[in-house]
Amino acid sequence: MTANNKKSYGPLLAKIISVVFHPILMPLYGLLVIFFAPTILAYLPPAAKRILFLIVLIDNVIVPLSLMPYLRYRNIITSWAISERKERVLPLIITSLLYAFTVYLLHRFSIPFFIKSFTLATLIVSVSLTLVNFRWKISIHSAGMGGLISLIVVLSLKMHVSLIGCLIGAILLAGIVMTSRLYLKSHSPAEVWSGFFLGLLVAGGVLMTF
């Protein structure tokens, strides 16, 4: 492979990683961890898993994505990547409101409390990112990965099972995602690491508390 090929494939690979592990998808990945990790939560009825997954998919992925063309049309955002800090304010507020609706909805169902705590954690992380973004740009991708790692750690502690393989995989993925954001020059190292620790500590604190 020539140097030119490496240069052309590098940004493309980094963009693919950023899309596959986009923060809007992290709650879905978190649910998959909860559903398929070797804990008592894996024994939830398949129908219940499907309903929970669909609720999060619709409320927190499909709805916000469907609003993107309107925001772009109104010039509220100038690119699909929403790289400018000021342009992130409204999308983050919308995301937080949708998470709040998901939390309200799921708390009305008779489901394991850990899943309710997980949705609450995503809400509080989203609100925290929104507040920080008013003054300083922070990596939302990194926050999502930090939150996912916290989920695995707390799930392991509360369910008394070893999820070391899953944890190692999540840490490696976090490194890949954070490196991709730096490679694309979407963030500075400080923005990447601050996002990671915000997601790690806020999500971990909520999951351990509730």
Image: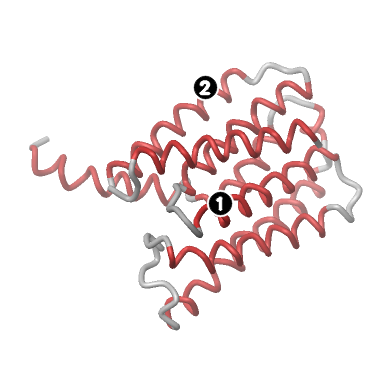
* Three-letter residue code for mark 2: Ile
Q: Quadrant of the N terminus?
A: top left
Which residue is found at the position 39% from the left and 38% from the top? 178
Which residue is found at the position 44% from the left and 76% from the top? 76
Circle 2 sits on which residue? 168
Position of 131 with respect to 154 (left or right) is left
Position of 51 with respect to 11 (left or right) is right
| x and y, in percent, of residue 55 in the image | 73, 58
Seen in the picture, residue 154 relative to 202 is either above or below; the reply is above
Position of 208 with respect to 192 (left or right) is right
Seen in the picture, residue 67 relative to 114 is either above or below; the reply is below
Circle 1 sits on which residue? 129
Q: Which sits in the foreground, 53 or 114?
A: 114
* Three-letter residue code for mark 1: Leu
Q: Quadrant of the C terminus?
A: top right
Earlier sequence position, callout 2 versus callout 1: 1
Position of 185 with respect to 93 (left or right) is left
Q: Secondary structure at mark 1?
A: helix
- In the rendered structure, find residue 32 and report the number of the disc placed on it: none
| x and y, in percent, of residue 67 in the image | 54, 73
